């Protein structure tokens, strides 16, 4: 039998797969390198270094999706980084070593706690701290406000490229419409995921396909819900895409209910969603869709959803005529497309609870200790150019980049490889033009290398060493290796220190949110309300929070046993929640069809509610949901 690797080592060797993101590669090549070249040509290399650094850090957040959503995903972290650079430069000039270390430690506490909110906040917290370390430890002739301005300008340049460059080879029906190619591909992927789930019903891959459908819906929801100047869709193309997304929600609901029942479907059941996916990508009419048999509630729901989708595609985003259908599906889809894709907007109080909650406190404390200790050690070792050590610690301490030991192994290996590669290039390339070319090539490689932390580290190491050498610092590959290994040791030590309170706070907080979302969804379905828009939004929230909890649990399970034991049993809670939400979806579809639940449904719900309370107690989780779950059980019995 094959030798099974321990989880912490297997995770370090795992890499993401997928096609090359050529659009991001082109943007990476046109971002940091050209900015640095212009600065060198006007004899202001230090400005180019800062601008290229801003573009490089923004490039690490450049993900597939819509153009409008990229403004928030790239712009918010860049704005935080500019603020960190300004603050770091001011502290570096005005504060002594002790005061500076204390200030950076406090900043680490804030940046780490804020990172618990979500991916964008995590990117903002990272850039805040990295830029603060660079501002305090990299001596540059420009004042702090100019450094911050050019740093943000570099990120804005990448955002401009993201907004104006069309996607190579994108299938669009109208060249004026290329700005929506990210949304179009995201919505098409939802229909493709529905088709894949229907094809897998009754097989071993059904649950994996359901998880893939959740990921596709999350991605499309984010792509369509980017920042906007108006509260409504302002173009026919956007209205059409929002209507197509809304039409996919009842299809996803019916497919999930059919997967829950477990009865294999005829192959033609998946043909309709596949044709809809092609229609979204090409902009052409979907044509007649094959209707499934209407033998069970799930298939009747699928047939109704396909009929509604065909009508929505034919309307092309226009409002239905007064004589048209106004059933619950049509009304729900219209409300979803018109009033927004999220049921409950994010409130400041909820964000504050997340930041100050168990996950935010635990992560903030780890970041503060790692960042502060690294800054203190770096200043003790160097009088200038000491930023590498604390900046490295910031990346190492981020839990959303993988388990702790996996991050350390990948960072160490990537830095060694990148430093050796740069030393070889620096020995033969002419300065500064050869280094500028190296920056451009590295920027183009970041979107590909981002699939593995070690590869990303290697590429960024080459890019940053090229930048600082253009800025006037001598070649320092070997000292960077030593500092990286020292940062690895500091973060490993801090990551395994005992802490007040219960460990695994991030996992527990995300599981708590997933449990509350599942409770809200179940309560809405059992209430008998026929508000489809609210139900779909609650269903989306339940599955999204569950997917986030799953990701956090998977990362925690790949830690060393001393850390992994703090989240034992949480995977069983997530399993029960997943089955509860799937069962709730099946109940919703059955209620739509018959108006009442069968004994099989009520018995299954009651069993899962009891099992959820039991498993939460076993995992050491407590919340208001346990009492609410018992109340729901009483309602089911009644």
Image (tube, rainbow, N blue to C red):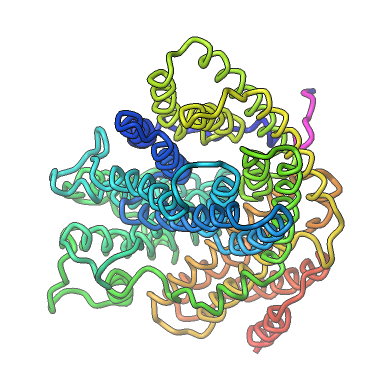
Lateral position of residue 383 relative to residue 426, left or right: right
Lateral position of residue 588 relative to residue 549, left or right: left
**Residue 29 shows in the view:** no
Tell me what residue is drawn at x 84 percent, y 45 percent.
561
Magenta segment includes 7:
yes
Instruction: Give x and y (percent) for residue 214.
Output: 49, 55
Instruction: Give x and y (percent) for residue 184.
Output: 28, 49
Lateral position of residue 499 relative to residue 608, left or right: right
The residue closer to the viewer here, 185 or 195, is 185
Instruction: Give x and y (percent) for residue 629.
Output: 68, 80
Instruction: Give x and y (percent) for residue 436.
Output: 40, 25
Magenta-highlighted residues:
2-9
Magenta segment includes 396:
no
Q: Residue 64, located in which quarter of the rendered image? A: top left
The residue closer to the viewer here, 472 or 450, is 472
Q: In which quarter of the image is the C terminus?
A: bottom right
Q: Is residue 525 above or below residue 561?
A: below
**Residue 18 shows in the view:** yes
Tell me what residue is drawn at x 24 percent, y 38 percent.
170
Lateral position of residue 245 relative to residue 266, left or right: left
Q: Quadrant of the N terminus?
A: top right
């Amino acid at each position: 039998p094959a030798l099974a690797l321990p989880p912490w080592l297997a995770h370090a060797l795992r890499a993401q797969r997928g096609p090359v993101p050529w659009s991001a590669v082109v943007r990476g090549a046109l971002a940091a390198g050209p900015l640095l070249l212009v600065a060198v040509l006007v004899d202001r290399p230090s400005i180019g270094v800062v601008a290229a650094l801003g573009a490089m850090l923004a490039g690490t957040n450049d993900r597939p999706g819509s153009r409008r959503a990229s403004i928030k995903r790239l712009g918010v972290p860049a704005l935080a980084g500019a603020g960190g650079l300004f603050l770091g430069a001011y502290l570096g000039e005005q504060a002594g070593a002790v005061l500076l270390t204390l200030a950076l430690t406090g900043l680490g506490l804030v940046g780490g706690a804020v990172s618990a909110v979500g991916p964008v906040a995590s990117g903002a917290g990272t850039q805040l701290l990295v830029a603060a370390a660079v501002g305090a430890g990299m001596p540059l002739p420009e004042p702090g406000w100019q450094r911050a301005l050019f740093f943000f300008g570099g990120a804005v340049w990448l955002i401009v490229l993201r907004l104006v460059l069309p996607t190579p080879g994108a299938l669009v029906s109208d060249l004026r419409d290329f700005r929506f190619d990210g949304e179009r591909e995201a919505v098409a992927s939802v229909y493709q995921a529905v088709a894949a789930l229907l094809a897998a019903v009754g097989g071993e891959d059904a649950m994996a396909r359901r998880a893939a459908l959740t990921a596709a819906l999350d991605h499309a929801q984010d792509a369509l819900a980017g920042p906007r100047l108006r509260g409504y869709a302002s173009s026919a193309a956007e209205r059409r895409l929002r209507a197509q997304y809304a039409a996919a929600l009842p299809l996803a609901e019916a497919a999930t209910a059919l997967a829950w029942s477990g009865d294999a479907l005829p192959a033609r059941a998946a043909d309709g969603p596949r044709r809809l996916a092609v229609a979204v990508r090409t902009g052409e009419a979907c044509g007649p869709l094959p209707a499934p048999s209407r033998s069970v509630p799930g298939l009747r729901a699928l047939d109704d959803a396909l009929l509604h989708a065909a009508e929505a595609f034919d309307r092309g985003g226009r409002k239905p005529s007064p004589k048209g259908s106004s059933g619950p599906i049509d009304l729900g889809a219209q409300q979803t497309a018109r009033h927004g894709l999220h049921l409950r907007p994010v409130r400041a109080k909820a964000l504050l609870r997340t930041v100050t909650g168990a996950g935010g406190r635990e992560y903030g404390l780890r970041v503060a200790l790692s960042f502060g200790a690294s800054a203190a050690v770096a200043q003790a070792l160097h009088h200038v150019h000491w930023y590498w050590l604390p900046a490295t610690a910031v990346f190492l301490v981020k839990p959303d980049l993988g388990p702790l030991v996996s991050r350390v192994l990948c960072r160490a290996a990537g830095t060694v490889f990148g430093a050796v590669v740069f030393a070889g290039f620096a020995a033969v390339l002419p300065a500064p033009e050869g280094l500028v070319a190296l920056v451009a090539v590295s920027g183009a490689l970041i979107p590909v290398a981002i699939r593995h932390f070690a590869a990303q580290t290697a590429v960024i190491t080459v890019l940053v060493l090229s930048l600082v050498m253009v800025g006037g610092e001598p070649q320092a590959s070997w000292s960077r290796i030593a500092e990286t290994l020292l940062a690895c040791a500091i973060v490993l030590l801090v990551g395994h220190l005992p802490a007040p309170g219960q460990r695994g706070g991030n996992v527990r907080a995300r599981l708590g949110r997933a449990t509350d979302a599942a409770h809200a969804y179940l309560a809405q379905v059992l209430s008998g309300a026929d508000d489809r828009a609210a139900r779909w939004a609650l269903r989306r929230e339940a599955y999204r929070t569950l997917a986030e909890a799953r990701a956090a649990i998977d990362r925690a399970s790949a830690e060393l046993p001393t850390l992994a034991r703090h989240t034992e049993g949480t995977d069983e809670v997530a399993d029960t929640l997943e089955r509860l939400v799937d069962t709730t979806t099946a109940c919703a579809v059955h209620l739509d069809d018959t108006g009442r639940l069968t004994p099989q449904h009520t018995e299954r719900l009651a069993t899962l509610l009891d099992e959820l309370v039991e498993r939460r107690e076993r995992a050491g989780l407590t919340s208001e949901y346990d009492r609410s779950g018992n109340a729901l059980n009483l309602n089911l019995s009644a």
